[in-house]
Image (spheres, grey):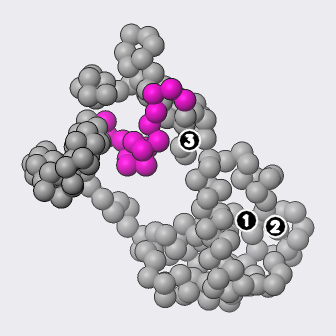
């Protein structure tokens, strides 16, 4: 499954499958694929809830499991794909963008929270996140020269170069960045 299916998907899809596989082993530990019944999957779902996972996370695990079981069925290793009851109460959006006032308050508190040598790098990162709109993991992967997400200063305007499989689109892309973020960098 990993070689035939996941190798052509985004890296995060592979990580999600591995996390799901580990959770299945930890909670229900089926000896054979054919042991994956609707009852076992229900037990798995209950086990995920008992661990305190959010409904969206449970749904994500079940989607990864369902995709795997559908492939197993297509390969003839399973006679029937068991029913998987997907959670219905998943929140659409957990977070919201912070306001300018919230950003300014947070920025002003950096020197109180961070030790002296770390205050400036933290302020630089916070301002970069504010100006760019990048997610934290995207900002941490941002590089000047080579990597999954790089700054591209060739051409008329500065852009972010995102390599194939660095995000959900699985396509290489060049995205414009704002002039104030380019100046900040």
Question: Separation of disc 1 and disc 2 at Cα?
Answer: 6 Å
Residue at 83% in and 81% down:
32
| Residue at which label 1 appears | 68
Kindly give the residue lying farthest to the front in the view shown: 117
Residue shown at 76%/74% (left/top)? 81
Residue position for label 2: 72
Where residue 102 sits in the image (x, y, percent)?
Answer: 13, 52
Q: Mark 1 and mark 2 in contact? Answer it, CB < 8 Å.
A: yes
| Residue 70 placement (x, y as % from top left) | 75, 65
Say which element carries label 2.
helix
**What number is the disc on residue 166?**
3
Residue 2 in magenta stretch: no
Residue 151 versus residue 33 in the image, above or below: above
Report the magenta residues as a range: 132-146
Of the image marks 3 and 2, the number of the one nearer the N terminus: 2
Of tags 3 and 2, which is closer to the observer?
3
- Residue 57 shown left or right of residue 12 in the figure: left
Q: Is residue 53 left or right of residue 172?
A: left
Q: Are marks 1 and 3 in contact (CB under 8 Å)?
A: no
Visible residue check, residue 38: no
């Amino acid at each position: 499954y990993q070689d035939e299916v996941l190798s052509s998907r985004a890296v995060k899809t592979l990580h999600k499958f591995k996390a799901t596989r580990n959770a299945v082993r930890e909670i229900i530990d089926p000896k054979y694929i054919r042991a994956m019944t609707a009852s076992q999957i229900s037990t798995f779902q209950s086990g995920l809830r008992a661990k305190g996972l959010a409904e969206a996370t449970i749904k994500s695990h079940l989607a990864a499991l369902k995709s795997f079981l559908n492939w197993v069925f297509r390969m003839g290793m399973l006679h029937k794909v068991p029913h998987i009851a997907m959670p219905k109460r998943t929140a659409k959006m957990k977070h919201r963008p912070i306001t300018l006032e919230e950003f300014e308050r947070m920025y002003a508190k950096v020197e109180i929270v961070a030790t002296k040598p770390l205050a400036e790098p933290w302020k630089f990162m916070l301002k970069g996140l504010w100006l760019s709109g990048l997610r934290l993991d995207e900002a941490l992967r941002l590089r000047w020269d080579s990597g999954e997400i790089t700054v591209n200063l060739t051409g008329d305007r500065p852009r972010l170069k995102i390599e194939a499989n660095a995000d959900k689109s699985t396509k290489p892309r060049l995205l414009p960045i704002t002039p104030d973020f380019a100046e900040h960098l």
